[in-house]
Image (cartoon, rainbow, N blue to C red):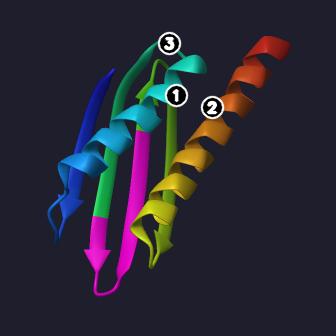
Amino acid sequence: MNLTITGRHFELSDNLKRDIETKVERFKKYFTHIINVHVVISRQKERYLTEIILSAKKLTCTAKEEDDDLRFCLNKAIDKVEEQLSHLKDKIKNK
């Protein structure tokens, strides 16, 4: 799995990068053949926008969140992607 973390209009701390890496590792329990995960965090005045784009074999999941708190915004976006992956995994199992 290739992980790309991009910070726009501000610098990402090493702590934040490590947190993102550990949280994105949870995606592997749903699909082992994830190709690429791109996390984009941008700052617009006092608000943060987090976008996660996950690419796997024949599937793409995206999530966007916007909030004043960076950690809350990031966690909500990760939860959205996890929910999508869980739903897709259940869908595949039922077939």
Task: Look at mark 3 in the image and give the residue it sits on.
Answer: 32
Q: CA distance from mark 3 to mark 2?
A: 11 Å
The magenta segment: 42-53
Secondary structure of the residue carrying tag 3 is: loop
Which residue lies under the disc numbered 2? Answer: 85
Considering the whole magenta stretch, tell me its main secondary structure: strand
Residue 58 spot, x, y in % from top left: 50, 21
The picture places residue 6, in percent across and down from the top left corner, at 21, 52
Marks 2 and 1, how far apart at CA: 8 Å
1 left or right, relative to 9: right
| Mark carried by residue 27 | 1
| CA distance separating discs 1 and 3 | 8 Å
Residue 47 shown left or right of residue 89 in the figure: left
The answer to the question of whether label 2 and label 1 lie on touching residues, with beta carbons closer than 8 A, is: yes
Element class at badge 1: helix
Amino acid at the residue labelled 1 = Phe
Q: Please, what is the three-letter code of the amino acid marked with disc 3? A: Thr
Residue at x 46%, y 18% (from the top left corner): 57
Nearer to us in this view, 58 or 17: 17
Residue at x 41%, y 56% (from the top left corner)? 51
Can residue 95 be seen here? The reply is no
Specify which label sits upstream in the sequence, 1 or 3.
Answer: 1
The quarter of the rendered structure image containing the C terminus is top right
In the image, residue 47 lies in the stretch drawn in magenta: yes
